[in-house]
């Protein structure tokens, strides 16, 4: 009996030790940088969110996803059947932990014209037609709707100004910068709208279909045109007044203006020339030939500009010298840079899939699922890659967050602010 008690006591001590180390290990696992799935490996699908409604007609629009201040995912979805709208656009919010629906907004009309943008306080902004909406991030309720004025005074007369908005950027102070640039017979203008929905200023412009960019110090950069030429412009964020202009034929509407870490402006002008401009005195630092059809641009954490050309591939340029490093290279379509300098995006072939590559095109990892969109990729601060495929939103385990240096994605950051100073 004495021996049996000793054995039982030893077993109890062994069980206690096992439980102790098990709980200690679990604690370490669940306190890891990524709390979503402790056992997940890089490339694993963590969850899949289905767009609410009829699966045969509900689609996520091919536009950049947005990530809120609390990690919620925002997308725009609509109903369509045989190419015809059946249900209006709404903004949908998804919980990051499990992909469950958090809320959906009220109907916002059809054919959304802008990205979803998240303000400094988490408020969601989106445009549809001639309206700018402010949406509560907690409930999805519309805070306010600002509409383009029917008329505005010009040279002593009221002129017709009611037209579709396009282009959305967040000023350093939280104001919304936008412009009317859609088709139609009306006077176009750039507008500054405060976070309470009040118009602070406007300036008549010859609008181009390019994104607005906010640079170092809050300066607004845009492409415009006057009666005789196209222009790259710099404007005062407090008044809208022009600071300087330079001749620039803009080409494609995807020609975004990027800002390097030192504040220099890098973009395409004349459709075939890449140019770098000093933001302090707007002197040209360098210019170099670039393919006519190159348009989407990002800047890597290690200082290379990447230009995506849908016909020939991706080209790399040193942002200090303008020298071309390589190209064309087969790389993901419309990629984001993670903090390791890897390109996360879509390989656009007959069977699109999410891929992570280095700058030579070498595959690091991939997740092959049919039907991924090109622009709906976001990388969260806790290393999760989110991507849509038309009817579903996927959360995929990554191995690095979005880069905090360079211009790591087309809209600059996960809030889609197009602002050099925002993250």
Image (cartoon, helix red, strand yellow):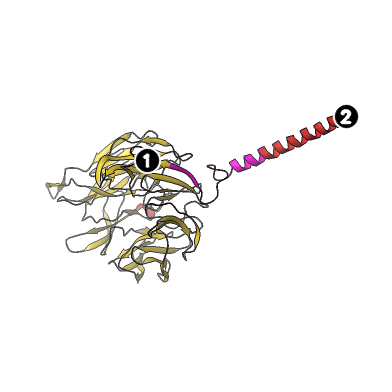
- Decide: is 251 above or below 157: below
Decide if residue 8 is on the left or right side of residue 406. Answer: right
- Find out whether the residues at labels 2 and 1 contact each other: C-beta distance under 8 Å: no
Residue 148: in sight, yes or no? Answer: yes
Q: Which residue is found at the position 45% from the left and 60% from the top?
A: 300
> Where is the N terminus found, in terms of image quarters?
top right
Helix, strand or loop at mark 2: helix
Give neighbour class at mark 2: few <14, some 14-19, many 20+ (Cα, 10 Å): few
Give the number of the disc on residue 351. Answer: none
Provide residue 400's location: percent of width, then percent of height.
51, 52
Q: CA distance from mark 2 to mark 1?
A: 66 Å
Give the number of the disc on residue 51. Answer: 1
Provide residue 131's location: percent of width, then percent of height.
25, 42
Q: Nearer the viewer, residue 83 or 295?
A: 83
Q: Nearer the viewer, residue 114 or 41?
A: 41
User: Looking at the rendering, which quadrant does residue 306 occupy?
Assistant: bottom left
Total tally of numbered discs in the picture: 2
Name of the residue lying farthest toward the right: 2
Give neighbour class at mark 1: few <14, some 14-19, many 20+ (Cα, 10 Å): many
Name of the residue lying farthest toward the top: 1
Q: Which residue is mark 2?
A: 2
For residue 41: magenta? Answer: yes
Helix, strand or loop at mark 1: loop
User: What segment is highlighted magenta in the picture?
Assistant: 23-48
User: Looking at the rendering, which quadrant does residue 298 occupy?
Assistant: bottom left
Provide residue 109's location: percent of width, then percent of height.
25, 40
Residue 193: in sight, yes or no? Answer: no
């Amino acid at each position: 009996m004495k021996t049996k008690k000793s054995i039982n006591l030893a077993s109890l001590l062994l069980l206690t030790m096992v439980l102790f180390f098990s709980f200690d290990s679990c604690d370490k696992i669940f306190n890891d940088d990524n709390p979503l799935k402790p056992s997940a490996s890089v490339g694993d699908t963590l969850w899949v969110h289905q767009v609410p409604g009829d699966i045969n007609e509900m689609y996520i629009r091919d536009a950049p996803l947005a990530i809120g201040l609390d990690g919620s995912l925002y997308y725009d979805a609509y109903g369509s059947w045989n190419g015809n709208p059946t249900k209006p656009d709404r903004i949908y919010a998804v919980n990051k932990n499990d992909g469950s629906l958090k809320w959906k907004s009220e109907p916002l009309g059809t054919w959304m014209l802008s990205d979803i943008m998240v303000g400094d306080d988490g408020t969601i902004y989106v445009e549809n037609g001639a309206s700018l909406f402010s949406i509560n991030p907690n409930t999805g309720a519309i805070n306010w709707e600002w509409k383009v004025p029917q008329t505005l005074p010009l040279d002593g007369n009221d002129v017709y100004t009611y037209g579709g908005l396009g282009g959305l950027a967040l000023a350093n102070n939280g104001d919304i910068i936008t412009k009317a640039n859609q088709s139609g017979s009306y006077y176009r203008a750039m507008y500054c709208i405060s976070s309470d929905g009040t118009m602070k200023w406007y300036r008549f412009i010859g609008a181009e279909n390019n994104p607005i960019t906010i640079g170092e110090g809050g300066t607004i950069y845009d492409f415009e045109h006057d009666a005789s030429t196209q222009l790259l412009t710099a404007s005062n964020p407090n008044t809208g007044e022009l600071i300087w202009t330079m001749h620039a034929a803009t080409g494609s509407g995807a020609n975004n203006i990027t800002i390097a870490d030192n504040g220099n402006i890098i973009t395409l002008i004349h459709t075939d020339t890449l140019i770098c401009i000093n933001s302090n005195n707007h002197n040209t630092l360098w210019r170099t030939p670039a393919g006519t059809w190159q348009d989407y641009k990002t800047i890597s954490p290690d200082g290379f500009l990447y230009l995506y050309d849908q016909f020939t591939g991706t080209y790399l340029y040193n942002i200090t010298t303008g020298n071309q490093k390589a190209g064309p290279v087969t790389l993901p379509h419309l990629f984001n840079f993670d903090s390791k300098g890897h390109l996360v995006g879509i390989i656009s072939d007959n069977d699109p899939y999410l891929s992570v590559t280095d700058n030579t095109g070498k595959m690091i990892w991939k997740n092959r699922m049919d039907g991924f969109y090109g622009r709906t990729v976001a990388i969260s601060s806790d290393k999760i890659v989110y991507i849509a495929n038309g009817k579903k939103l996927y959360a995929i385990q990554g191995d690095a967050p979005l880069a905090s240096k360079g211009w790591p994605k087309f809209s600059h950051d996960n809030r889609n602010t197009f602002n050099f100073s925002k993250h």
